[in-house]
Amino acid sequence: MDQRSAAFRQEGVAVLLAVVIACWLDVDAITRVLLISSVMLVMIVEILNSAIEAVVDRIGSEYHELSGRAKDMGSAAVLIAIIVAVITWCILLWSHFG
């Protein structure tokens, strides 16, 4: 198992838990949709990041600066999506329960 599939599996479990929690919470439909959508965004970006990495790895095994930058930008996009999801959950739950 490589590092990418391990990260994807961990994020998949986290998204599944978040969706279950969002469905269990006593919140209105719009809040529930926003909670679920924010974590689904993480999975979408992770899938795109995996595609970028697969294409870069397919092109060649030797290191190239642009290949490294492409992979770094894909990883940064995943991190930003995770931060957006966490902030979304914090704001929505704080406004609902706080």
Image (tube, helix red, strand yellow):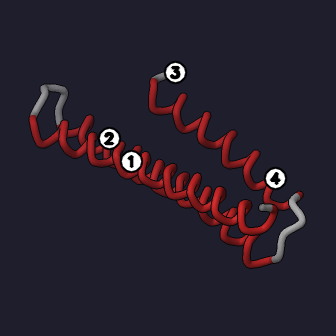
Q: Where is residue 57 in the image (x, y as percent from the top left)?
A: 26, 35
| Residue 63 screen position, x and y as percent | 13, 28
* Amino acid residing under circle 2: Glu
Distance CA(mark 2)–CA(mark 1): 6 Å
Q: Which residue is drawn at 49% across and 51% down?
A: 83
Q: Mark 1 points at which residue?
A: 49
* Percent coordinates x, y for residue 26 in the rendering: 90, 65
Left-right relation of 7 to 96: left
User: Mark 2–mark 1 contact, CB under 8 Å?
Assistant: yes
Q: Name the residue carrying label 3.
A: 1
What's the residue at 58%, 52% (across, down)?
Answer: 86
Which residue type carries mark 3? Met
Secondary structure category for the residue under label 3:
loop
> Residue 35 versus residue 42: which sits nearer the camera?
35
Q: For marks 4 and 1, give the CA distance.
A: 26 Å
The amino acid type of the residue labelled 4 equals Ile
Label 1 to label 3: alpha-carbon separation = 17 Å
Q: Name the residue under label 4.
A: 21
The disc, 4 or 1, on the residue closer to the chain's N-terminal end is: 4
**Regarding mark 2 in the picture, which secondary structure is present there?**
helix
- Find residue 58 and report its image quarter: top left
Q: Which residue lies furthest to the left in this view?
A: 65
Q: In this view, does 80 lie to the left or right of 19?
A: left
Residue assigned mark 2: 53
User: Of discs 1 and 3, which sits in the foreground?
Assistant: 1
